Amino acid sequence: MRRLLLYLLLLCSSMGWSQRSAEAGIVSDNDLYTSVHNDRYYTNGLELFYRFLSKSETLSTSRKIWEFRLGQYMYNPQSVYTAEPITQDRPYAGYLFAQGGINIYHANGNLLKANLQLGVVGPESGAEATQKFLHSILHYPRVLGWKYQIRTTPAVQLNAFYSHKLFSGNRLRKADYYAQAEAQWGTIWSSASVGVMSRITLNGMLTPINHSSMYGAALNQSRDYTDRRELFVFFNPRIQYMYYDATIQGSPFNNSSPVTYTLIPFRFNAEAGIKYGRGRYTYAYSFNYRGQELRNNVITGYYYGSIQLGYLF
């Protein structure tokens, strides 16, 4: 897995440097970004991303951006003191992955994203070592239950996302709205979701979505970002149907995981946040809510914060 991640990173660099414009950045998710008392379920995530603008454009397609990511997600029960399976209201699980894909931004404001993820859920993800290291340097309690984590599951994921602009005749450009649909299929997650995303500017007019940082489209061919500036808030409620989740149900190839649960298939999820871009830098913060995912007498919905930093070059 380490060799795969290194190879993908080298491939991204070799492909991206030949292009005219690129962006690199980091995304950090953690429940502590919303509350020091909220530490449960999706407890930490880290992604490194690299994207570059394709030179090929058509009359109907405004732009194509290739994107690559390396990431690690970490899932815990409600309490890190849960040493025995009977006390764990959600399985311990880690997910390590490499991702490559393309984002196609149409001139009419519509967007199509497709990507492939390869990775692993299980001890090979390194999530246990990462969490124990973070807890040791931050003087947090010792984590006790990782020996009962979801067993090794190879990850092959196909993901697609489509966003369709609503009210295309609106010329005010102070707010805009998009109907969205997303589908995931693979050995870790199989799901579908629909929702509506809206942006509201806090600084002049909205940047068109196919040139905005909302979905990573701030790159331009000239690489001149002197006058670039945008500031907006966004809201994105959605309904999700989850058919399979290996971080909760265990591997689809075996039943050796010691702690698993039955899914609640329909959930309400939501995200609200703020994005600021000026010059070559993009900053973002969002609050994320996830509805109750599985069935037991303890688990509830949960929330976490996400921080992003990007640099254009």
Image (tube, rainbow, N blue to C red):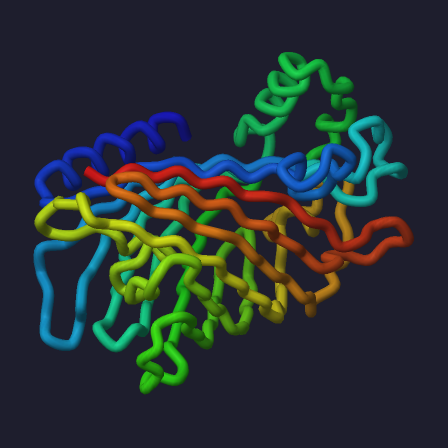
Residue found 28% across the figure and 36% down from its top: 8
Q: Which of these two is toward me, 34 or 44?
A: 34
Residue found 62% across the figure and 65% down from its top: 243
Residue 239 placement (x, y as % from top left): 62, 70
The quarter of the rendered structure image containing the N terminus is top left
Q: Which of these two is toward me, 161 or 27?
A: 27
Residue 221 placement (x, y as % from top left): 11, 51
Looking at the rendering, which quadrant does residue 131 occupy? top right
Residue 190 showing in the rendered view: yes
Locate residue 72 relative to residue 282 in the image: left or right: right
Residue found 48% across the figure and 69% down from its top: 198
The quarter of the rendered structure image containing the C terminus is top left
260 to 178, vertically: above or below:
above
Looking at the rendering, which quadrant does residue 126 occupy? top right
Residue found 50% across the figure and 36% down from its top: 28
Residue 94 showing in the rendered view: no
